[in-house]
Amino acid sequence: MKSVLAIIPIKPQMNPQLKWMAMERAYAMVGENPALDMGIFIDARAEPSQPGDCRVWSKVARVRNKVLGSIDLAKWDYLLWIDADIIEYPPDLPARLIEANPEGMTAPIVLVEESNRFYDWAAFIIAGKDSVRPADRSRIVGRNLQHEPPYWPEEPKEELVEMACVGAVTMVPTWVYRQGVTYLDHPAFTDHYPIARFVRDCGKRVICHRGVKVAHAELPRYGEAWH
């Protein structure tokens, strides 16, 4: 039986409704994936800003790395990272992502709730396009996925689409982290990029599963700013 630890970093000042939804959805997964040994890790530790931080992703990278230092990677086959403001996803999400790409890094389609607007364009980089490195994370047409359908320059024919990087919700086998790879911020990429790059360098796949969709909170509804 494969073991999966679902990890949800939650900032202490996050909207209470979003916190409750994050925890409710996470614990619902445990009973809906009988073929998996599921664990849940909720991390609500505060992370102060530091000089030189590149916007919010610097703090997020430190939070993820602190989590990696807090768990026994030998006990888990996969880590499922779920951003705290992901408010809806299929309860069998872990099983579906692992089945699609058991040895690599996999993410679902991430849409803003009650819409078809793609949320995390900054993290989702089209395969072969990560050589385009602007001085900031401004949306690059032809490099990053776009907000509006079909998200790619042309709608893919396949359900599993090769990517240079993915984010927001990622299933990653723990063999990656056992090699010492950590999350890092970069002006041109989000903190997921070093993980995705390492997976690809090892000859494994980084994919977006178009058949699995999750909903990201429309943050202003909850008194939160977009990020």
Image (cartoon, rainbow, N blue to C red):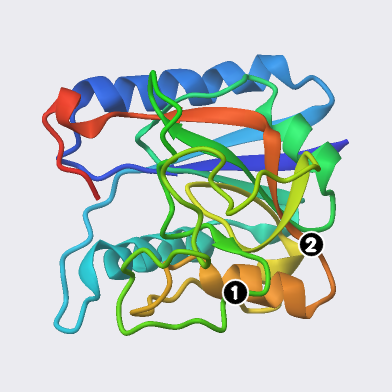
- In the image, residue 28 lies at what x, y percent? 56, 16
> Considering depth in this image, is 1 or 222 the residue closer to the camera?
222
Is label 1 in a helix, a strand or a loop?
loop
Q: Please name the residue shown 56% across and 75% down the image.
A: 194
How many numbered marks, from 0 up?
A: 2
Give the left or right position of residue 66, taking residue 18 as reference: right
Residue 74, picture quadrant: bottom right
Q: Please name the residue shown 16% across and 65% down the image.
A: 48
Residue 76 shows in the view: no
Label 1: how many Cα within 10 Å (few below 14, some 14–19, many 20+): some
Instruction: Determine which residue is flagged by label 2.
Output: 205
Residue 18 drawn above or below residue 185:
above
Q: Nearer the viewer, mark 2 or mark 1?
A: 1
Precedes in sequence: disc 2 or disc 1: 1
Residue 8 shows in the view: yes
Is disc 2 in contact with disc 1, using a CB cutoff of under 8 Å?
no
Q: Residue furthest right?
A: 1
Give the left or right position of residue 152, taking residue 220 as reference: right
Quarter of the picture containing the N terminus is: top right
The Cα atoms of the two marked residues, 2 and 1, are separated by 15 Å
> Considering depth in this image, is 51 or 193 the residue closer to the camera?
193
Residue 203 drawn above or below residue 123:
below
Residue 187 drawn above or below residue 115:
below
> Which amino acid type is shown beneath numbered disc 2?
Arg
> Which amino acid type is shown beneath numbered disc 1?
Lys
- In the image, residue 158 lies at what x, y percent? 81, 43
Q: Please name the residue shown 37% across and 82% down the image.
A: 134
Q: Please name the residue shown 37% across and 38% down the image.
A: 84
> Considering depth in this image, is 92 or 119 the residue closer to the camera?
119
Instruction: Determine which residue is flagged by label 1.
Output: 129
